[in-house]
Image: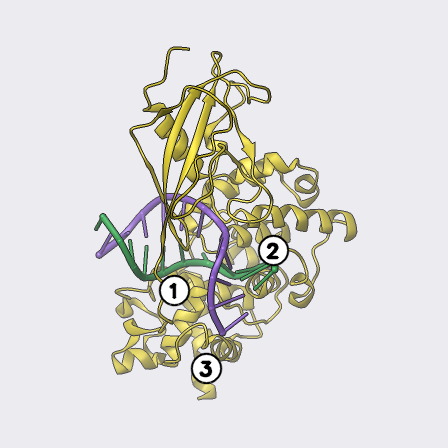
Chain colours: A yellow, B purple, C green
DNA sequence: TACACGTGGCC
DNA sequence: TGGCCAAGTGT
């Protein structure tokens, strides 16, 4: 069995050397072999962006962030609103707020140098067990177990772990630690994630192309696709609400910054009501309101939302000038509200 | 432990 | 089409 576990690392790294995905934040194995060292800033930024988020969604955001803020000192000096606008559309906005907090701690308290171990990294805002381990393994060659959703799936199948998640997490972490090699732990972690993303997929895994097919207990028992098991999910309730789009004759619009805590915290949006089964209409000012024929439907992690969008012409203080307002700076829900407002029957300006 | 927290793609 | 899923963290 000890040989079997060592063989996993060897087989996987051999596969990775031939099949590693080319990604904007990744240093190729060839460059690594020549002594190129991954930049902890870029590793950190990519790992935070990739939390619960697909590679396809992250690519352009990573490119824009690194062009605009090439190092942690630059990011630490950025305005909150600029970072929130650049993050708009990527979701889980607490990540953006913690990203900035973390950059400022590193820049101001740590001389611009990220901590050198997973244990120390995990003390920073927005860096949990996964991200701390990923940065330490990839940037510092620390042989720690890096366990994300891909690794949970791969390992649960390799060893036929039938305990449902999240209860299985400690066991999966221990098993991952056993198969993590002392040499090239960062490549091993990325190889596990590539394997999970391209071959050992949630549905229809292509075991015929898997470098670990001979080591996989679940495959030999014909239960690979049924793992990992997961605790049943709760049903999503449906909530309703009102959103209000105010525009003056010049095309300036009424926007507000949402409180830092809670849903869409720190993001820009249109004023609105509470979101509940029976919301109370709360227009931000007295005006001749017109309801858009298009409702906005949006699903968050834990509930469905249906918004009735109302529009009005009005002059008031604090409008965002037409030429500085970009719908792309809004979270997706508010971008949908804006789109719905366009199809309303606006009164003449 | 359980829940809050976004979004887009897939079948 | 609606539920599932993706490189999780904070409370």
Label 3 Cα neighbours within 10 Å, binned few <14 / some 14-19 / many ≥20: some
> Could you tell me which quadrant the N terminus of chain A lies in?
bottom left
Task: Give x and y (percent) for residue A153.
Answer: 39, 70
Q: Quadrant of the C terminus of chain A?
A: top left
- Check if mark 2 and mark 1 are on a common chain: yes
Name the mark on residue A196: 1
Q: Whole-percent x and y of residue A212?
A: 36, 74
Which subunit holds the residue at mark 2?
A: A
Q: Establish whether labels 3 and 1 are both on one chain.
A: yes
In whole angstroms, how far apart are the C-alphas of marks 2 and 1? 24 Å
In the image, A12 versus A106, the foreground residue is A106
Residue at the spot 43% in from the left edge and 50% down from the top edge: A55
Mark 2 or mark 3, which is nearer the start of the sequence?
3
Where disc 3 sits, the SS reads helix
- The residue tagged 2 is A126
Which secondary structure lies at badge 1? helix
Nearest the eye: A140 or A338: A338
| Residue neighbourhood size for the residue with mark 1, other residues' Cα within 10 Å, grouped as few (<14), some (14–19), many (≥20) | many
Mark 1 and mark 2 in contact (Cβ < 8 Å)?
no
For mark 2, does the 10 Å Cα neighbourhood hold few (<14), some (14 to 19), or many (20 or more) residues? some
Q: Tag 1 or tag 3, which sits nearer the N-term?
A: 3
Q: Which mark is residue A56?
A: none
Residue at the extreme bottom of the image, as rendered: A1
Residue name at image x 59 percent, y 71 percent:
A143
Instruction: Find disc 3 in the rendering and name its residue.
Output: A5
Task: Mark 3 vs mark 2: give the one in front.
Answer: 2
Chain for numbered disc 3 = A
Picture coordinates of residue A92 (x, y %)?
Answer: 50, 49
Front residue of A140/A244: it is A244
Compute the Cα span from label 3 to label 1. Answer: 18 Å
């Amino acid at each position: 069995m000890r040989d079997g576990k060592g063989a996993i690392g060897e087989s996987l790294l051999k596969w990775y050397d031939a099949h590693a995905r080319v990604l904007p934040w990744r240093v190729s194995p060839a460059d690594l072999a020549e002594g190129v060292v991954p930049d902890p800033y870029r590793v950190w930024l990519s790992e935070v962006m990739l939390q619960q988020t697909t590679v396809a969604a992250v690519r352009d955001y990573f490119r824009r962030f690194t062009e605009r803020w090439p190092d942690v000192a630059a990011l630490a000096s950025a305005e909150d609103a600029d970072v929130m606008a650049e993050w708009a559309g990527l979701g889980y906005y607490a990540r953006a707020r913690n990203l900035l907090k973390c950059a400022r701690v590193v820049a101001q308290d740590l001389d611009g140098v990220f901590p050198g171990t997973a244990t120390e990294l995990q003390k920073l805002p927005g860096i949990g067990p996964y991200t701390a381990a990923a940065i330490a393994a990839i940037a510092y060659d620390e042989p720690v177990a890096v366990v994300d959703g891909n690794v949970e799936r791969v390992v649960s199948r390799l060893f036929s772990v039938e305990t449902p998640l999240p209860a299985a997490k400690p066991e999966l972490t221990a098993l991952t630690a056993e198969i993590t090699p002392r040499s090239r732990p960062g490549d091993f972690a990325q190889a596990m994630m590539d394997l999970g993303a391209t071959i050992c997929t949630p549905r229809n895994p292509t075991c015929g192309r898997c470098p670990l097919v001979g080591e996989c207990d679940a495959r030999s028992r014909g239960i690979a696709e049924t793992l990992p098991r997961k605790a049943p999910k709760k049903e999503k309730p449906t909530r309703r609400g009102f959103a209000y789009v105010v525009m003056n004759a010049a095309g300036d619009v009424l926007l507000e910054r949402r409180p830092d805590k809670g849903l869409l915290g720190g993001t820009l949006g249109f004023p609105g009501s509470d979101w509940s089964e029976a919301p109370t209409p709360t227009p931000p000012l007295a005006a001749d309101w017109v309801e858009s024929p298009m409702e906005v439907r949006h699903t968050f992690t834990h509930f469905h939302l249906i918004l009735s969008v109302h529009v009005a012409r009005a002059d008031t203080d604090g409008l965002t000038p037409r030429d500085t307002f970009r719908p792309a700076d809004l979270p997706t829900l508010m971008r949908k509200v804006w789109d719905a407002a366009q199809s309303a029957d606006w009164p003449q300006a």
